[in-house]
Image: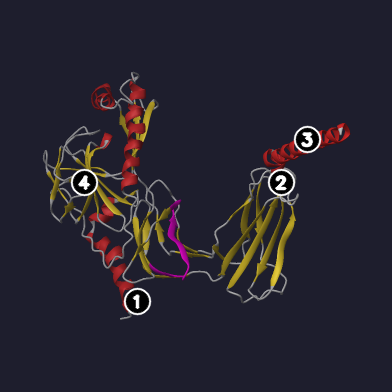
Amino acid sequence: MRRKKHKRSSGKIISILLLLGLLLGAGYVYTAPEFERVAPTVDSSTNIFWNRKEPLKIKMADNRELKNFELVLSDGRKSLIVGKGDFAKNTKEQILSVNYPKSKILDPKAKHLTLKVSVHDSSMWNFLEGNKAEKIININVDYKRPNVNILSNSYSITQGGSALVVFQAEDENLDTLYIQAAGKKFKVQPYKKEGYYAALIAWPFTETGFSAKIIATDRAKNKRVIDIPLYLKNHKYRVSWIKATDKFIDGKISDLASSDPEYAGIENKFDKLRAINETMRLKNEKLIHTLSDKVPEEMLDSWKIKKFYPLKNGAKVASYGDERHYYYGSKDNEVSHSYHVGYDLASTKMAAIKASNPGTVVYANENGIYGNMPMIDHGLGLYTLYGHCSKLLVKEGDKVREGQIIAKTGMSGLALGDHLHFGILIQGIEVRPVEWFDAGWIKTNIDDVFKAADKIISGK
């Protein structure tokens, strides 16, 4: 009896120890990093486009360590392993490149393919097989470049000036379309019919060289680049040396500095001059560039613009494109430098400023050195601004009509006398106002370009 009881007690103890061991083992398996249960990830859209020339990029990642992968490409009838292998130790993330196989197993004319991606991590979970992720990627094969044709464009462009181009761009998978010029991507606006576009472009006056290209890419990264044929006219802009007097610095410069906490504490007069004439100026111009960088996305049926004549009997007091060097005492003591990016006109004191063309007011407020300044959007990326006003007669969002009085001239901002600083911008780039003052230039470079393109589009 004692032996039986002793055996039963020993059996219970062993059972309890085994159970504890199992519980501890299970706990270890469920909590140990080596047995983590987070599956790796495959970062790719389920539907993509491929031109077969550039490799597909497949990103894989795991919270601890990637182990191996397999990539299988299929045309729907036959399959081919296009990638298989182990990852280097301690690899948590890697981008794999998939090239179209040289093997003739797959149908070379197939327009649709699938890529099966399989990846394991190095976990000991799942009987040491690790966690697995699979993803099926549907591929649309497209190796045809977009079709781009120029219908009409301005014959020439002047340094600091403007030009117009109307063109056709077609691709069932069109992704991006823009004009690359002067280091900037100019937006284009749909024109007349689907597949046709128009754009104004600009040549910054500070750059001596210029080229413009229409660039179209589709969703498979096929790319078409077309040069816009423009005859280039360089122009030499004036260089001015301006004496910075104590009266100027202690007057207008100090007044503007005191109005802005960012500059109010500057005591050195030359630092103060540079802060207003350079730092504040660039800040004000950045706002102007941002406001004028927008182009409508809706279809444009027509665009008519008349010559600009904002100030009746206005006399020129400063030109566009002047490079200004400020010196103190003598010219060998230059203390500041800036560019004048508008055209200054003056007539009588507090003269009426008129909108020469209809548009929408995008800004009507104070803007640093420009003082009280309305800005008008005339469509197709063309904007006008009116600086140093004494009084604003419009507000943001107003629709203005041709001939409407929008403001009065003045000397707000960095102005020493009553005048209008008139600026014209194309997609955030200041351009030569004198071109837009000239009805003949507008006819040749804008109206005639649209007319030539309209004949092709209408087929008449």
Residue 28 x/y as whole percent: 71, 38
Determine the secondary structure under disc 1.
helix
**Which is the main secondary structure of the residues drawn in magenta?**
strand
| Residues at marks 1 and 3 touching, judged by CB atoms closer than 8 Å | no
Task: Specify the label residue 123 is tagged with.
Answer: 2
**Image colouring:** secondary structure
Indicate which label's residue lies in the foreground, 4 or 1: 4
- Count residues near mark 4 (Cα–Cα under 10 Å), then give few for <14, some for 14-19, many for 20+: some
Q: Which residue is mark 4?
A: 396
Residue toward you, 450 or 101: 101
Span shown in magenta: 167-184
Dot 3 surroundings within 10 Å: few (below 14), some, or many (20 or more)? few
Q: Residue furthest top?
A: 267
Q: Based on the displayed image, in which of its 4 quarters is residue 440 positioned?
A: bottom left
2 or 1: tag closer to the N-terminus: 2
Residue 207, visible in the rendered structure: yes
Name the disc covering residue 17, or none: 3
Q: Are marks 4 and 2 in contact (CB under 8 Å)?
A: no
* Residue 293, numbered circle: none
Rounded to the nearest whole Å, what is the CA distance between mark 3 and mark 2? 28 Å
- At label 2, which amino acid type do we have? Ser
> Is 282 placed above or below 448 here?
above
Discs 2/1, front: 2
Q: Position of residue 78 (x, y in %)?
A: 68, 74
Q: Earlier in the sequence, mark 3 or mark 2?
A: 3
Residue 456: which disc?
Answer: 1
* Sequence-first disc among 4 and 2: 2
